[in-house]
Image (cartoon, rainbow, N blue to C red):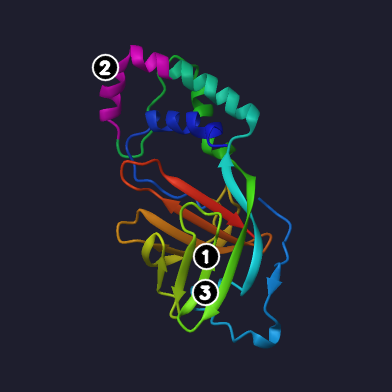
Amino acid sequence: MKNKWMAALFAGMLLTACNGEEADKDKETEKEEPIEEVSAENETAVDEDNPSHVFKEGTFEADVMAAGLPADMNLKLNAISKVMQASLQENADWYMETLAGLKEGEPLPYDEKLGITQEQYDLLLSANDHMTLGKVGESDVIVTKADEGLTIEIPSSKLMKKLTINTEGTSIQSDAGELSYDGEITASDNQKVTGKWDGYAFVDSSKMVEFSFGELEESGDTIIYIRSAQEGQETQTEILIF
């Protein structure tokens, strides 16, 4: 699935001055009933101010999702990107000089030296607008509550298999380290890939590891977003919806 959008993302890196990475918190799915769920008699009062209230206790079957380009769009952007990269190699001095003069986050202005048409260039710049979520697998999500807090287990995860949110909802202890509460996530039109959702974000001290979760506005499903951006390694993300 990853190869479907790497060429487009690489092109975007070439065309934009260096900028900080932003998680696009970014499917509209049928509501899955939990495989196992505690009875209503055992449920305690919900504290809406505590991020943990998003989760119900039980074992849930989640869809593992990944962001990518539709096949036809991927082929088109791949072809454009290869032509542009070859042209930039031939015009390396111009490219480096022009890029150095851009403000942070400012796109490279169109020039015939890019080797592609204005229309093709605009399509490359808008690649993120064509991203969609697609199901790439399934996973159990096991939620249990105890005196020390709420524990979430994701056996299939490569980034964070087990974590515990403390009773106050201010920190997470996980097999990927300790994460602290980093604020609320507010549903917005910028969440084009996932659809709008409200939730909460937790990050480690270096902000290289993130665990966010919330509720999709349209379907009411729970969404989990995990990101790991270790130095010298490719950024990895996992999205689960249930």
Residue 158 percent across, percent down from the top left = 49, 51
Question: Disc 1 marks which amino acid?
Answer: Gly
Q: Which residue is at the front of the view, 11 or 42?
A: 42
Contact? badges 2 and 1 (CB < 8 Å): no
Residue 77 percent across, percent down from the top left = 54, 25
Contact? badges 2 and 3 (CB < 8 Å): no
Placement of 105 over or under 62, stated as above or below? above
SS assignment for the magenta stretch, majority: helix
**In front: mark 2 or mark 3?**
3
Q: Residues within 10 Å of mark 1 (few under 14, many from 20)?
A: some
Q: Secondary structure at mark 1?
A: strand
Residue furthest to the top: 90
Mark 2 → mark 3, Cα distance in angstroms: 53 Å
Q: Secondary structure at mark 3?
A: helix
Placement of 32 over or under 231, stated as above or below? below
Q: Which residue is mark 1?
A: 199
Q: Residues within 10 Å of mark 3 (few under 14, many from 20)?
A: many
Residue 8 percent across, percent down from the top left = 49, 30
Placement of 232 over or under 100, stated as above or below? below
Placement of 133 over or under 1, stated as above or below? below
Contact? badges 3 and 1 (CB < 8 Å): no
Q: Which residue is mark 2?
A: 93
Q: Earlier in the sequence, mark 2 or mark 1?
A: 2
Q: Earlier in the sequence, mark 3 or mark 1?
A: 3
Check the picture and name the quadrant holding the N terminus: top right
Q: Which residue is mark 3?
A: 52
> Can I make out residue 92 in this image?
yes
Which region shows up in magenta? Answer: 85-102
